[in-house]
Image (cartoon, rainbow, N blue to C red):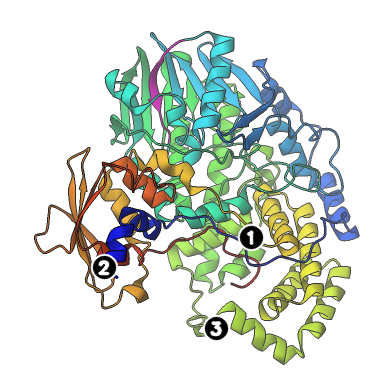
Amino acid sequence: MKRIAKRIGPAALCLAAIFLLTGCGKDSGVGGVAGDAGEAAIAANQTMAQKLDFSQDQDFQDAQRGLISKPQGQIRAADETVLVDLGAFHFVEGEAPPTANPSLWRHAKLNARIGLFKVVDGIYQLRGFDLANMTLIEGKTGWIVVDTLTCRESAAFAFAFAQKHLGEKPVSAIIITHSHVDHFGGALGIVSPQEAASRKLQVIAPQGFLEEAISENLMVGTAMARRSSYQFGKDLERSAKGMVDTGLGKATAYGSIGIIRPTVIIDQPVREMLVDGLRFVFYNTPGAEAPAEMTFVIPEKKAFCGAEILSQTMHNLLPVRGAKVRNALLWAQYLDDALAYTADCEVYFGQHNWPIWGRDRIKEFITMHRDVYRYTHDQTVRLINAGFTPREIADAIQLPKDLESYWGARGYYGDLRHNVKAVYQFYMGFYDGNPANLNPLPPRESARRYLELIGGADKATDAAEAAFEKGEYRWAAELLNRVVFGKPDHTKARKLLSRTYDQMAYMSESAIWRNSYLTAAQELRDGPPRKGVDRSGAIDMMENIPAERFLEVMACSLNGPAAEGKNYKFNLVFSDTGETFVLWIEHAVLHHRKGKAQDAQATLTLNRPIWIKMMAGTAGIKDTLLSDDLKISGSRIDLIRFFALLDKPSGTFPIVTPR
């Protein structure tokens, strides 16, 4: 055995170490396509059309204002995968079809105004190249780039498009407004870490940015990427029966994610500084829309960048993709503060959606958003103290008419019902106080027993079908979800549940609820994706974070039950950086510490690029077996056994069907 392990050497080590492999879905689904809108969905959408004032066209003027040029074609990855089709949403025009909520359709048309825009002299935006906006501000020597989109490919494409129309200038600084990947992941498409270091480029970010970016995109990156495909409709057809918008923009580019380390941290509530000769005043706003975030004012331009604490939509207090729950009260306070420091501003621009011009309109915009979050917070807390549970409160709260009718704060991205539950969770946790919910049965076991009580899957499905015909989609979905989890091979239930989700999607004003329902319907028909979101796209990010942070991420992949009773210890030496760490398992926990252990069972010496490729599952024979930069001393077999304890999540786990 030892001879075999020694002969296999680093190649076997590489295979054992891969824990971010993509996988294949187990469930093949039941087939079919999305259905037409039913009578109940059509009636609900007609009611919505009569409820709101669709004659208001100021937003359309704003969304088109300052257009310099529209992009064409596609943004592709190195392997020719299409990441963004810039013409995919040309169908979003005219009156809303029966299969789309008319309010969402209006918003989708506004977000479909993509291109390079002039905001004011010296400030430009690239909108529609990715989920977020890239803002370019003209400094004394070059472009100050505000937010670099989601991935290298979209950022490089957008910046090249701007250079073509505005003239080529060097990047003089990068400002990262917050810790969500659609605002920093494309940094390496703008400038390399080496160039940034050699030019001593200012990279400005809020306090806590690096830690929070790693937490969200690497620590729970596999699960969040899987769930984000629901939120953003990643695999949905772009059509009137499919994905029409995301609320914040048109689509997300799932490409190569990188990160660049900040050189300037805004760690004070307010900080004024010169950036390439232009005066900026930064305002820290952590714990609201993102754990690490900041807004800023450019006094000379009378311009206010609201980052993402302001967008042309109600925002999420807890995204459906998952994230740390947000503080609605604090968010409202930040917006109240903004009313004071933006009093002289003539233009607002955000890192999503379109700008607003005029002091009075900016004041109204900020005020409405402030009061939406404050009302949501206060009324939820009031009902918490009256003993109501999250689901009860979500059905009870409705915004006052003046807030509800304000286009710029409607629920295209966030949703009031979901936000109510987030406020409850922020204060009370997920538990509703009823002991029956302290230790409930797992969904599959619970569903099986409910079906036995009801009289079987057929009877439950018949009841759901009757509810469906009455347009009682929420109840139909609840019943059918029990059937699918209790009897996964019940074809009629799966087909009916997919049709139910279609109808719920067609009625949804929230783009991410629509995308979630439609993705669920698609997976009931076709099964989970055969390939997860390609985590190798995050290699650029892994290469540019501190080693300690990556080892923390690695520890979360240790299979605790399998590691129980194991006491492996080895040294990890990065030959290119000179860093040395001891990694050991104790009480089924993977620990690390700087330094070297004399009693380690093995020492693995390699450079960081090879290590990152091994962890991302992209290292091949050339990187390992044939590499002079990888050496092992001590017990290779113990090292292989250690790496075999690391889970290899595929990112294709089922969501609407049982595991």
Where does the magenta region start and end?
Answer: 169-177
Lateral position of residue 160 relative to residue 82, left or right: left
Disc 2, SS: helix
Is residue 168 in sight in this rendering? yes
Q: Position of residue 472 (x, y in %)?
A: 81, 68
For marks 3 and 2, the one nearer the N-term is 2
Q: Is mark 3 on a helix, strand or loop?
A: loop
The residue beneath circle 2 is 2
What number is the disc on residue 197? none
Q: Earlier in the sequence, mark 1 or mark 2?
A: 2
Residue with the mark numbered 3: 441
Q: Which amino acid does label 1 sit on?
A: Ile
* Residue 414 in the image, given as x and y percentages of width and height: 60, 49
Q: Quadrant of residue 634?
A: bottom left
| Separation of residues labelled 3 and 1 (CA atoms) | 30 Å
Callout 1: SS: loop
Q: Position of residue 583 (x, y in %)?
A: 22, 59
All told, the count of numbered labels is 3
Please state which of the two labelled residues, at mark 3 or mark 1, is closer to the viewer: 3
| Residue 397 - label | 1
Q: Do the residues labelled 3 and 2 touch (CB within 8 Å)?
A: no
Which residue occupies the extreme right position in the image? 39
Q: In the shown orientation, is residue 358 left or right of residue 184?
A: right
Mark 3 or 2, closer to the camera: 2
